[in-house]
Amino acid sequence: MGDSSGSVSIDVERIFFGGKEHRVRTRHGPLSVSVYGDEDKPALITYPDVALNHMSCFQGLFFCPEAASLLLHNFCVYHITPQGHELGAAPISSDVPVPSVDDLADQVADVLDFFSLGAVMCLGVTAGAYVLTLFATKYRERVLGLMLVSPLCKAPSWSEWLYNKVLLNLLYYYGTRGLVKESLLQRYFSMEVRGNRQDPESDIVQACRSLLEERQGANVWRFLQAINSNNHSS
């Protein structure tokens, strides 16, 4: 990778869009894993937020020259995409059991085994941060460090729990449209980025809005159900 910011930007585009896709069989269903960089380098595992994949969740980070020069130059990046969140994914059969969040953490361990990885760095966003934190708790010897963005640090209040239940019901019956889509966009972006009557919403919000329209609601419901199953007040 070159030293100048210009050459870094070119390399980032080549690496980000030139990753190798793997279909990894785990104890709890298959996962899509995209690998970017030199596999001889230390491993960095990423996990996105609900309804996102590695392209929609981490593109902004890896297109930032400063971040790319640090991450892509020093790590081989393994992007885990939750089951059913791949581009063009079909609905997961209702006969397939809904995983628990512990199952999602075990899937991360299975990915490491598939690639013969030892201890790794982890980068997760919100729901993905929760999964990787649980993974680090269960498999401490396999984690060198955690980088968590907007992690779920405590159980929600009863009002938050009720809101999540309503959102799950709307997601189950109507998919990622209408109120559900707006709720997810509020989850991802600040009010300034989403825009208002005076300022139009940014390109990245519009792109994410289009992405959510293509998501299979049942698949997103399964993932959110897994996250919420252990993340509530007793």
Image (tube, grey):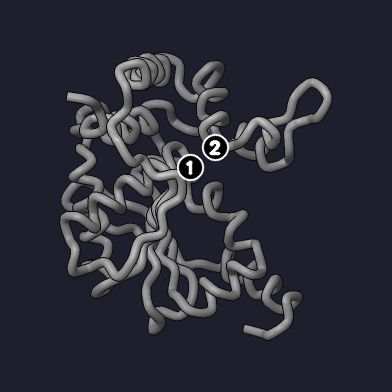
Q: Amino acid at mark 1?
A: Leu
Please tell me which residue lies in front, 53 or 71: 71
- The residue at 23%/30% (across/down) is 229
Residue 6 appears at what percent x and percent y? 76, 75
Q: Amino acid at mark 2?
A: Tyr
Label 1, on which residue? Answer: 52
Residue 13 appears at what percent x and percent y? 65, 67
Quadrant assignment, res 93: top left
CB under 8 Å between callouts 2 and 1?
yes
Q: Residue furthest right?
A: 198
Q: Which quadrant does the N terminus fall into?
A: bottom right
Residue 62 appears at what percent x and percent y? 58, 62
Quadrant assignment, res 92: top left
Q: Is residue 86 visible?
A: no
Query: Is residue 35 left or right of 94 when viewed as pictured?
Result: right
- The residue at 59%/69% (across/down) is 68
Label 2, on which residue? Answer: 188
Residue 2 appears at what percent x and percent y? 67, 85
- The residue at 32%/22% (across/down) is 157
Residue 64 lies, with reference to residue 96, above or below; the image says below
- The residue at 27%/61% (across/down) is 111
Residue 126 lies, with reference to residue 37, above or below; the image says above
Q: Crowding near pointer 2: few (<14 within 10 Å), some, many (20+)?
A: many
The residue mark sitting in front, 2 or 1, is: 2
Give the SS element for disc 2. Answer: helix
Q: Crowding near pointer 1: few (<14 within 10 Å), some, many (20+)?
A: many
Q: Which quadrant does the C terminus fall into?
A: top left
Q: Number of labelled discs? A: 2
Sequence-wise first label, 2 or 1:
1
Query: Is residue 141 left or right of 190 when viewed as pictured?
Result: left
